[in-house]
Image (cartoon, rainbow, N blue to C red):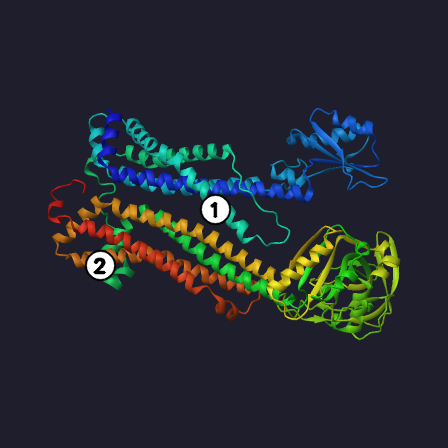
Amino acid sequence: MWRNYSRSYMKANRASSISIMAAALIATMFLSCVLSIAYNFWAYEIEKIKLEEGDWHGRIVCETLGADDLSMVCQFANVEKAVINEKLSKKDESVVDVYVQNARTIYRDMPLIATYLGLNKDYIQYNSLLLSRYFIHDPEDETPPLLLALYLAILIIVAVSLILIIRGSFELSMNARIHQFGIFSSIGATPRQIRTCLLQEAVVLSILPILLGSIPGILISYGVIKAINFFAADVSGRHKAAFQYHPSIFVSIVLISFLTVLFSAWIPARKLSKMTPLEAIRNTDRSLLKKKKHSRILSFIFGIKGELAGNALKAQKNSLRISFVSLLLSFLGFSIMLCFTVLTEISTRYTYFERFQNAWDIMITLKDTEISDFSLTTELQDISGIQSAAVYQKAEAMTFLPKELQSDELIALGGLEVVTEPVKAEGGFQVSVPIIILDDTSFLNYCSQIDIAPSLDGAVVLNQIWDSVNSNFRYRDYIPFVTENRQTTTLYKEGQSVEIPVLSYTKTAPKLREEYEDYSLVHFVSLTLWRDVLKPTGEAEADSYIRIFSRGNASLSDLNNLEQEIVRLVSRRYKLESENRVQERLSNDRLIQGMVMILGAFCILLAMIGIANIFSNTLGFLRQRKREFARYHSIGLTPQEMRKIFFIEAFVIAGKPLFITLLLTVLFVQSAVTASYLDPMVFWANAPILPILIFAAVITLSVALAYYIGGKRLLQCNLNETLQNDALV
């Protein structure tokens, strides 16, 4: 009986069935897109870690291991292989990378391996970042990464959103049948039979959309990955993302979508089955407008028609909630995303591009190369398009600063203890000393630029510290750090110390694309001084750098050609990464543009969901609206006045989320501008007002179109017969 009834109802009410199928299709597509993109981001992160850190699971670092020891490690049941890392191993130290078959037991296996070799836990390491991406965490870590929790939270939010989306369509369809199910209930149908019937219909209508909806979601996620690759193609050091998909993703999407549909249908089905036969037959639950509180604002602005429109909106409050949330989230997300993008672009422009635009044209990073091992400085200078080239490396040391050596300006502010929290030592403070090692030619040129006698036998000290008391990080003021009467400086590192001459104190750093630590005493030294004196007391970074200035105002094509010529010369002997200033700016602009397009598309999808719900709600409540407007017609309201009621409803539905969004966006911009210490007029001069207005206009026109179609269909009916005939349109 119920099966035949369901078939006949679905055939007779194709519009309602299509609405449910469309909701299931959109929800599945949305879920498929989100999960596919999340999976690709996860896979890309793992690839990145493997390229940068390696794909090993555990590591043993100890004195030289023999072949027998290595063989014993490989004999452990879970060990797939163990190999000596030739790159990291030293003469008196072996580094063994261990790969296991089941990575989930790595934190149990490695201590056992170490014990078997007679070593303690200090000699073993874990590729913790890679393991955490596989959701494997150190049991002794009290604060494990929350990536899994984040993924689950996103999945739950998406699933709840989809439940709300699909529930609206099911509720419209089921509420239209309250009268019929009241009759069935009166002749003996149980609530369980009614729920089962409705859930069976939901399954039949949703199976095909669920299976087909995954395909456009996969295609959209594929397009997103391609778009990311396109916009980030010129980002230095980034490897290209390859679209990946796993059958388990498809199975998960189908399963989650199926459960979502069942739960979405169960909510209104349970509510409908709980109604008494008398309530269902009379249809007093939803079909009739209930008496509500007065809509004072609408009645004040629009009079009696505003009162009627407000009463109708309150009666449909639950049905319109999904539309309101979708429109609010889409417009709010779009507005805040654009404003955040503008703020990011302004901040990047001020703190990077404008700050360093005269500090470099081309940058070469020499991977795993010490400056003393670079031998092409002369050949670089012979390239016709190069005005100057500086080769440098960065190192780190410490110095002891007695309190009396602080400058008078710093003491006037309260000393180091006021502007920062320094590491205290007896009678003074420990201060970080970043060391910039310049090739000898560049160091001598730097000495000439600051008007001191060129010499390779001492350091130039950048004598400045940020006045954090009287300025902010956006617009910094600097004061002298130390008194300039000390002719030597003593540097410390790992128990060793060395004293070197100070050639000069200066407030002018060499033109390098470098941002130095706050509250540190930067030293610029020559390669000769570093190699002969300072190397034992400083820890140099693995990479070296080449800063290049081109001749004249080079265009993008000129810089690209010059960059290619330099890369051809240097890459013969060294592994490198290169970038040029103009291309870096264009790449940054493309990244921002890509981010706006991708996030904007997501916001548009949310808006489409909200607008689709409004169309569904407007066209689906024909019975209720028809009876409602038949009463209005009986008391003398003209079709023109009824259209005005529809206009007021559309105005409220579209205007409410827009108004709330504008308030929240202004508050967000105000707090963000204040927190970033930007001049508000700088933001408002670049504010994305036009795109926001266009997006708002599209939402408003879409809502107006939904009400125009619904109102036109309703007013074309014979309202005089409606109060006598209770049939659906």
Q: Quadrant of residue 470?
A: bottom right
Task: Decide: is 155 above or below 719.
Answer: above
Give residue 86's quadrant in the image: top right
Q: Which mark is residue 279?
A: none
Q: Position of residue 224 (x, y in %)?
A: 49, 47
The 10 Å Cα crowd at callout 2, few under 14, some 14 to 19, many 20 or more, is some
Q: How many marks?
A: 2
Left or right placement of residue 275 versus residue 484 in this view: left
Residue 208 point in image, percent of width and height: 36, 33
Q: Is residue 230 above or below residue 259?
A: below
Q: Residue at x 84, y 35 (%)?
A: 64
From the viewer's perspective, is the residue at label 2 or at label 1 nearer?
1
Give how far across and how far down residue 54 sits, in percent.
Answer: 69, 40
Quarter of the picture containing the N terminus is top left
Q: Secondary structure at mark 2?
A: helix
Say which mark, if any, is on residue 223. Answer: 1
Residue drawn where x is 51% and y is 54% of the image: 595
- Upstream in sequence: badge 2 or badge 1: 1
Q: CA distance from mark 2 to mark 1?
A: 43 Å
Residue type pointed to by label 1: Gly
Residue topped by disc 2: 644
Report the quarter where the C terminus lies. top left
What residue do we see at 73% from left, 55% from top?
570
Instruction: Characterize the local packing of mark 1: few (<14), some (14-19) or many (20 or more) Cα atoms within 10 angstroms.
Output: some
- Asked if residue 268 is positioned above or below residue 699 in the image, the reply reads above
Task: Check the image and report above or below for 47 versus 293.
Answer: above
Name which residue type carries label 2. Lys
Q: Is residue 651 left or right of residue 514?
A: left
